[in-house]
């Protein structure tokens, strides 16, 4: 099974690119963020034609998350335990191919210490509460734009981020709490080196200068992480005309556990 997460930064604007990419990369389950669509505008037909079922949770111009699956889609849950999120449509989960998937879009936080930054920490608290009701032994994948660079090696220049969001001790602690519960950062397992990013600002040629952050993640319980054979960031998807400012993160999951489980 090939799984991926991608902040598409408007599914309406990038629908042809997304469906073409799904076919080209042969992805089985894609978790999307920032669809910026209401549920009644979600392009279910286009995904059905491409061979995918679509679960969407959106509110219109902002936020929006979705799951596209060609290996089944069942037990869709919008919001944490079906409860509307005060920060908007940022969480949807479903069972695909025997694995529980969740597409997550954490708030940006805007400015350290602001009400938006506190709301971001609150959102992570609700995510931890959702996890607390589940079993770390189950097959579970949380993927999405977490708006957290877990370590200094996940930003192009740590000095440039002093005093900024995405790298504070509090935000990193919130991310680490997900790992402490029983999730594995599968990309980091396969790429312990730094300098690999999933987001680059549109401005000032940041992508071509390599000035990015790794803030998009695939987190999996060990029963899934032990079966991941390959993990990568598809930089080519960021090079296309009118691209999202994020690149997809992919992982291949084998049918049976590997001997060297993380």
Image (tube, helix red, strand yellow):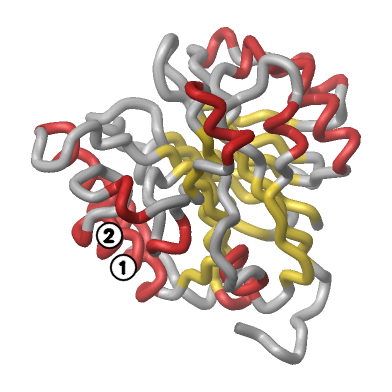
Describe the element under mark 2 as helix, strand or loop: helix
Quadrant in which residue 172 is drawn = bottom left
249 to 23, vertically: above or below: below
Horizontal and vertical percent for residue 55? 60, 31
Quadrant in which residue 63 is drawn = top left
Quadrant in which residue 222 is drawn = bottom right
Q: Is residue 96 left or right of residue 122?
A: right
Name the one closer to the observer, 19 or 131: 19
**Residue 102 shows in the view:** no
Q: Residue at x 18, y 47 (%)?
A: 163
Residue 208's tag is: none
207 to 212, vertically: above or below: above
Q: Which residue is mark 2?
A: 174
Q: Residue at x 9, y 41 (%)?
A: 113
10 to 217, vertically: above or below: above
Q: CA distance from mark 2 to mark 1?
A: 5 Å
Q: Residue at x 36, y 75 (%)?
A: 180
- Contact between marks 2 and 1 (CB within 8 A): the answer is yes
Q: Is residue 126 left or right of residue 186?
A: left
Q: Is residue 227 left or right of residue 175?
A: right
Horizontal and vertical percent for residue 103? 52, 42
Q: Residue at x 60, y 83 (%)?
A: 262
**Residue 36 shows in the view:** yes
Name the one closer to the observer, 119 or 213: 213
Crowding at mark 2 (Cα within 10 Å: few <14, some 14-19, many 20+):
many
Horizontal and vertical percent for residue 237? 74, 33
Horizontal and vertical percent for residue 162? 23, 50
Q: Quadrant of the N terminus?
A: bottom right
Q: Which residue is mark 1?
A: 177
């Amino acid at each position: 099974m090939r799984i991926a997460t991608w902040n598409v930064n408007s599914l309406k604007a990038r629908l042809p690119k997304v469906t073409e990419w799904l076919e080209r990369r042969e992805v089985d389950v894609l978790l999307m963020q920032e669809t910026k669509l209401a549920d009644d505008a979600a392009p279910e037909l286009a995904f059905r034609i491409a061979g995918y079922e679509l679960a969407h949770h959106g509110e219109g111009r902002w936020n929006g998350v979705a799951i596209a699956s060609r290996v089944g889609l069942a037990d869709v849950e919008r919001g944490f335990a079906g409860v509307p999120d005060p920060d908007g449509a940022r969480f949807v989960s479903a069972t695909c191919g025997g694995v529980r998937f969740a597409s997550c879009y954490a708030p940006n936080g805007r400015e350290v210490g602001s009400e938006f930054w506190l709301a971001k920490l609150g959102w992570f608290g609700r995510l931890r509460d959702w996890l607390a009701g589940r079993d770390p032994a189950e097959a579970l994948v949380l993927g999405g734009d977490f708006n957290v660079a877990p370590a200094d090696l996940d930003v192009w220049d740590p000095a440039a981020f002093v005093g900024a969001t995405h790298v504070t001790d509090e935000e990193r602690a919130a991310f680490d709490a997900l790992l402490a519960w029983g999730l594995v950062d599968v990309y980091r397992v396969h790429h312990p080196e730094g300098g690999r990013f999933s987001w680059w600002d549109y401005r000032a040629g940041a992508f071509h200068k390599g000035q990015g952050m790794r803030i998009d993640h695939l987190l999996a319980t060990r029963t899934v992480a032990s079966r991941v054979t390959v993990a990568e960031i598809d930089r080519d998807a960021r090079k296309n005309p009118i691209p999202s400012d994020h690149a997809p993160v992919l992982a291949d999951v084998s049918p049976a556990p590997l001997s060297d489980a993380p």
